[in-house]
Amino acid sequence: MKLLFAHGWGFDRHFWDALIALLPEWEHAIDDRGYFGTPHMPGIDGPCLAVTHSFGTMRVLTDPPPGLVGLVAINGFERFTALPGKPGVAVRVVDRMLRRFESDPRAVLAEFRKACGSDEPFGEINPEPLRADLLRLRDAQAPSPKVPVAVLQGGQDPILPADMRAAVFAGSDVHRIDHEAGGHLLPLENPELCAQAVRGAVGALA
């Protein structure tokens, strides 16, 4: 079993460093969307469990590896913005980010990361994939998962509304874990809890 890690919007492969250090018993494949440099999509042979954060969940569901057998979606969702009858983030929020992104992409990214709970500095950015994925966050809907899903959400998440968190993956084969004190960056805030969720998901597949 291999673990495939997919980060969310505005972060990179190093987002997973603390969690990966707690999971040495499995081989790791770590993608990078290229927001800060060269993108990387690792080749996956054989069965894998995807461990995703936020927008990374949409990315994996939209283009799943052939051997995908399960998903641990941390602060994850299949759609970001709200639709009639489907809760989510207001479209106007992403539209505002897109308008400002044209003139000052770095400031938009810094404000988003701060809103998530991260004041960590970051290097030079690659605006193209960042803008392309903002559009996906506004408009796209990922397919429903065809594999078992463990959903780990933070009860104090400043990015995802409570009704959206409660409704993600409705109707799918889902095991829900709610961390009442957690925010939007659970792999950084509480990597031990995330590692426990990954081990539980692997065990459930046995």
Image: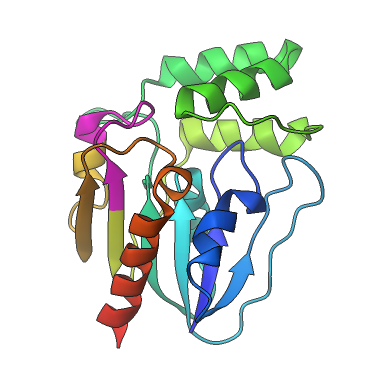
User: Is residue 131 shown above or below 166?
Assistant: above
Left or right, residue 71 beside residue 176: right
Residue 151 is drawn in which quadrant? bottom left
Left or right, residue 206 beside residue 118: left
Q: Residue at x 65, y 51 (%)?
A: 14
Q: Which residue is drawn at 69% across and 63% down?
A: 41
Q: What stretch is highlighted in magenta?
A: 152-164
User: Is residue 63 shown above or below 83?
Assistant: below
Q: Nearer the viewer, residue 199 or 166?
A: 199
Q: Which of 25 and 157 is in front in this view?
A: 25
Q: Which of 135 and 2 is in front in this view?
A: 2
The location of residue 101, given as percent across then percent down, is 67, 17
Q: Which residue is drawn at 28% across and 28% down?
A: 161
**Colouring mode (rainbow / by chain / secondary structure / one colour):** rainbow
Left or right, residue 85 beside residue 138: left
The location of residue 122, given as percent across then percent down, is 72, 32
Q: How many numbered marks have been drawn onto this rendered protein structure? A: 0
Residue 98 in view of the camera? yes
The location of residue 82, given as percent across then percent down, is 32, 28
Location of the C terminus by quadrant is: bottom left
User: Is residue 102 shown above or below 190?
Assistant: above
Query: Magenta segment: does it hold 106?
Result: no
The location of residue 74, given as percent across then percent down, is 38, 51
Left or right, residue 17 beside residue 137: right
Q: Residue at x 29, y 72 (%)?
A: 200
Query: Magenta segment: does it hold 163?
Result: yes
Residue 172 in view of the camera? no
